[in-house]
Amino acid sequence: MKRYAHIIGWGKYVPSKVLTNDDLAGMVDTSGEWIRTRTGIVERRIAAPKETTATMAARAARDALQVADIDPFSLDLIIVATATPDHLFPATACLVQDALGAWRAAAFDLSAGCSGFIYALGLASHLIAANAYQSVLVIGAETLSRITDWGDRSTCVLFGDGAGAVVLQASDVPGGVVSTVLGADGSGAELLIQPAGGSRLPASNQTVAEGLHYIHMNGPEIFRFAVRVMDKATREAIEKAALTLEDINLLIPHQANNRIIQTAARSLRLPQEKVFVNLDRYGNTSAASIPIALCEAIEGGRVKRGDHLVLVGFGAGLTWAATVVNWAVPLPMPPVSRWRMALRWLRYRGAAIESFLRRWWRRLEAIVKVPFKSK
Ligand code: UT7
């Protein structure tokens, strides 16, 4: 029997600290007016010192699991799409797995810049269709504020922090993720790059002094590339789903710049009401932008059962990606009962205790174990 991958849960988390355009105008040589007219951004969220990509991803994931009404233990796989992992290794997805107590799940990170969430969604839906997995948690999460040069007006006005998550589940009901188009062009790698901190240019006093651990971007080049691929990827994904542009109810684009979004919408001949925009409040949150937008579109009543959605993104790599989702879950979802919420809260407390015990057990094993002796 053919298997389909449906989005059955969604959640988002954004930090509470708001950084407005006016705040930025007091930090670098810019103005609120310039930022708003050139990008559409009015404010963005900035992670608190204790917040990280993993903690925000886990918060979004908990909400998504709540909506899906499934236990973290039943997850088979967790993918975190991010360009700002907590560490180069271990994967942020493993930290999320630990925070959720999703002990059965495999976990890994996916790096495809701002296209990462759609890459992960496409991969997860193919794994479900191939009968490899039943339930997959797909997260896009970023703490871009930690790699932003707050003295560089050409980049610092653009980015924000946050996380969005969806639960994908196998079903024999037709619909869900119906087509995915993924693309890359590594010849544009240097156009959007964090030059240092990897194996080519390991972190050193010199790389830090030269600001090579920050985001470096050629804005106008990325702009041109974005407009081209948003149109192309959207059309390809729709064609692959055997649909036409008229069948599309809502386009949820990567939230980088409202001028990019509007240019793409015009070339696709999609009216305003079919395009979802929330970058005025969050700025560009890279891999988190599309799942946060999807979540808000659902919560705002912009998605109905039977709708065809297109999610489309572009970013570092260079990469691009688009997917068509045929929404099959009835909306709005019935509210989760208090006792189920309490039960889940207890479940997460239990996961924290189990994680603690696992760490202590490992230490105990190391003490009790007969030490290895070489001759
Ligand atoms: O997720 C994917 C990541 N990135 C993107 O999607 C970014 C795509 N690119 C863009 O969104 C736009 O290129 C930007 C918003 C980054 C820049 O807008 P632009 O219209 O392409 O500006 P520009 O880079 O061509 O610069 C125009 C002028 C320059 O001044 P001069 O040389 O004309 O005197 C810049 O120095 O604007 C100046 N400028 C600023 N002025 C005030 C650049 N940043 C600022 C600023 N405030 N924040």
Image (tube, rainbow, N blue to C red):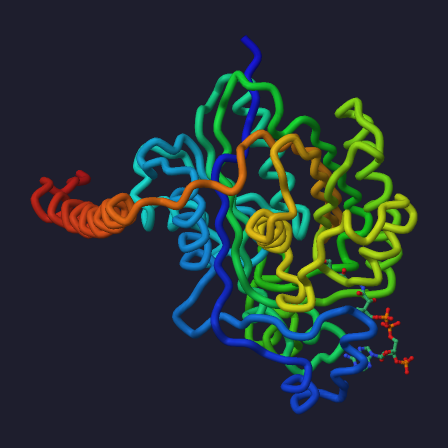
Q: Position of residue 319 (x, y in %)?
A: 74, 45
Q: In this view of the protein, which residue sits in the foreground, 148 or 22?
A: 22
Quadrant assignment for the N terminus: top right
Q: Quadrant of residue 204?
A: bottom right
Q: Is residue 218 left or right of residue 371?
A: right
Q: Residue at x 47, y 33 (%)?
A: 136
Whether residue 79 is visible: no
Q: Is residue 362 left or right of residue 58?
A: left
Q: Residue at x 38, y 33 (%)?
A: 75
Q: Quadrant of residue 178?
A: top right
How many numbered markers are drawn?
A: 0
Q: Quadrant of residue 7?
A: top right
Quadrant assignment for the C terminus: top left
State whether residue 122 is above or below residue 369.
Answer: above
Ligand 1 quadrant in view: bottom right
Q: Position of residue 332 (x, y in %)?
A: 51, 42
- Looking at the image, which residue sits at the far top? 1
Q: Residue at x 64, y 39 (%)?
A: 119
Q: Is residue 80 left or right of residue 244?
A: left
Q: Position of residue 53 (x, y in %)?
A: 48, 59
Whether residue 282 is visible: yes
State whether residue 24 is above or below residue 345.
Answer: below
Q: Position of residue 341 (x, y in %)?
A: 29, 48
Q: Residue at x 27, y 46 (%)?
A: 344
